[in-house]
Amino acid sequence: MTPTPDRVPEELIERYREAIDSQPDIELKGAKKLPFTSTNGYMYSSLTKDGRMGIRLSKEDQEAFIAEYDAIQFKNYGANIKEHLEVPDTLLDQPEVLGQWLSRSRAYTETLPPK
């Protein structure tokens, strides 16, 4: 995906929407420039301008996600984002599977104390 300097690539937004649309309890938030999902005041997935997606997961789900997708720590603006892993492009091509991970992410985030 070719990023543009001031917004997330449209192709990535569409793939993100497909995954979100596969899960009725998840709502896309944010402007087109930086879409995200959140609950209880916490973001649990987001896109970056340089064409990457991060997802927040419990410790157990992080281990499974890393084992399955060889995922790495998600960084935004050069900083590690706590509890977030980078979603590989191969998973972005599987909206229903990604949607299931987003649902697990939301369920975990709902266990955190509200902000």
Image (cartoon, rainbow, N blue to C red):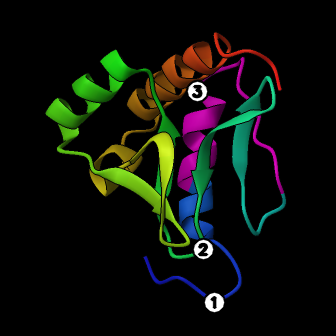
Q: The residue under label 3 is which amino acid type?
A: Ser
Provide the secondary structure element on which disc 3 rests: loop
Q: Residue 18, image x and y in percent? A: 58, 42
Image depth: mark 3 or mark 1 in front: 1
Which type of secondary structure does the marked residue at label 1 adopt?
loop
Q: Secondary structure at mark 2?
A: loop
- For the residues labelled 2 and 1, say whether their Cβ atoms are less than 8 Å apart: yes
Q: Which sits in the foreground, 8 or 83?
A: 83
Q: Where does label 2 land, which residue?
A: 49
Residue 24 is situated, as x and y percent measured from the top left of the image, at 70, 19
- What amino acid is found at the position of numbered circle 1 in the picture? Pro
Q: Confirm whether the magenta stretch covers residue 107.
A: no
- Callout 3 crowding tier (Cα within 10 Å): few <14, some 14–19, many ≥20: some
Residue drawn at (55%, 16%), measured in percent from left and top?
A: 108
Give the quadrant of the C terminus. Answer: top right
Identify the residue at horizontal 32%, vertical 16% (top origin): 60
Q: Could you say which is closer to the camera, residue 37 or residue 62? A: 62
Q: Amino acid at mark 2?
A: Lys
Determine which residue is flagged by label 1.
Answer: 5
Q: Which residues are magenta?
A: 15-30
Q: Is residue 18 magenta?
A: yes
Q: Would you name the residue on which mark 3 appears?
A: 22
**How many numbered marks have been drawn onto this rendered protein structure?**
3
Q: Residue 111's quadrant in the figure?
A: top right
Mark 2 or mark 1: which comes first in sequence?
A: 1
Q: CA distance from mark 3 to mark 2?
A: 24 Å
Q: Dot 2: few (<14), some (14–19), or many (≥20) neighbours within 10 Å? A: some
